[in-house]
Amino acid sequence: MVQGLLAKGLDGAVDWLVDFEGESSSGPTRDVQADTFDPSVKMQLTPEDYEAYRKAREAGDEEAIDAFRQKQEQQERDDRRSMRSFEQWWLSRMIETPRPLEEKLTLFWHGHFAASYTTVENSWHMFRQNQFFRKHAAGNFGDLLHGIIEDPAMLRFLDNNRNRKGSPNENLAREIMELFSLGEPELLGRKRSPYREIDIKEGARALTGYTFRDNAFYFDEGQHDNGLKRILGRSGRWNGHDFVDMLLAHRSCSEFIAWKIYRAFVNDVPETPPSDEVRNVVVQLGKTLKANKYNLKNTLGELFRSAHFYDASNRAAHIKSPIELVVGTVRDLGVPVRSIDTLRTAAARLGQRLGHPPSVKGWDGGRAWINTSTMFLRQNTAVWMLTGRDAGGHPWPKDTTPFDPMPLVEQLERQGEVDPDEATMYLQRLLLACPVDDARSQAIRQVFTLANNRVNADSLTAALCVLTALPEYQLS
């Protein structure tokens, strides 16, 4: 793939990357079956069940009460299994897709519009939200923002199903302003917040009646507050979509989304506020986004063609998330998947379980991914992926699936042999985002020395174990 992109040149490569809808295949061959996740095809508690349960409680019928609870517990177990299946399916899709930006953006939006199964407790709603993010991954941010206020998973996660006329719930209105569209007050060195507390309260009124029934959005007109509201300086009988339009029209919205895109694709930028140079780039990117009427594909294309994107200061400036680490290791090294559930579990132990962001803020990312515990587990995960065995005596499932690493260096082969010095340098250029010091480079070379200076499947696998344990391998 890398050689093919080089042949296309910068513009051609960027076009191929962002215009991923042109690819004929969009995921693993074992594509999702709706009934894998849809609770409606499993044993469901019906309104009749709940009515019978109510009557049983009134009558003190312990046998009927117990039967209802057993059915309820079985349904919950079934749905948790469905959620694990969904996590496995999505991880497989990320590994196998010929459209990598599509899945990277789907994961990005999952972290931006963060909703967790722990609260939602409905695998079908989580799956449908995932499909919604994928459909609009590089489409229009306005469509994403309008769609999220009708998304059952988000409505449940932020309690908007309890947002009623006369008793507004502010959760969705607050987060849609603070985390989904305008950003927190101190963002990018702002001198004042782009919104006030009254805007949140009035926004909550605009969102009254936005709920869901079964598996679909439902606008409960009887619970919608149709009175006059004043939001961001404008008065009217606003509803939820009017509210979203006002957010999209606000200058801070395009800047905030540009900031999130910048951190995800260019540089984590841990300092707050960022440097003047970074702020200027983000502000310009926000203007581009606004000028393109929130078209994400055009904005990403402009970013990926910019000189700033390729600046030396932005190389190795992003710490791989657990999912990026696992998926990237399989795709870059060509290692066998071995066990998709073990990879899912490993990523979760490293702090990133698909469908389970820790809060509505999503994952903190950046330096939060790395500590002494996760660094060891990252190294152990890579060793298991390469060898099928763990490096530290921990109870990982052993896997004897063979891995042939020789295709990684086949272009270096001369008269049936690969020079170990050339292989050492080539692997670093191929797999690391930045150069390493001589001591670390020599640690990789030493593996070939111990193998009588032979580059074969065993010595190359051992060298990869050393390379993937380097701090530089955690960067992209």
Image (cartoon, rainbow, N blue to C red):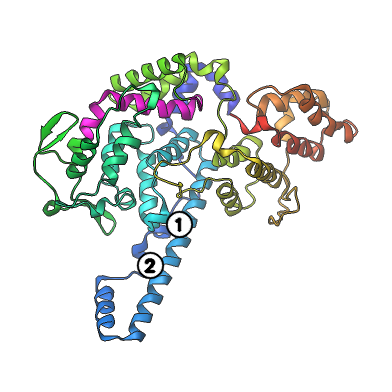
Relative to 54, say whether 468 is above or below.
above
Per the image, label 2 sits on a secondary structure element best described as: loop
Toward the viewer: 266 or 30? Answer: 266
* Residue at point 53%, 17% (across, down): 310
Q: Which mark is residue 279?
A: none
Q: Amino acid at mark 2?
A: Lys
Q: Nearer the viewer, residue 314 or 192?
A: 192
On residue 83, the disc is 1
Question: Is 300 left, or right, of 161 in this rendering?
Answer: right
Asked whether 246 falls inside the magenta stretch, the response is yes
Numbered range of the magenta stretch: 244-271
> Would residue 34 be seen by someone viewing this image from the given angle?
no
Q: Position of residue 388 (x, y in %)?
A: 71, 50
| Residue 1: % across, % down | 58, 29
Residue 370: name its quadrant: top right
**Which residue is identified by label 2?**
42
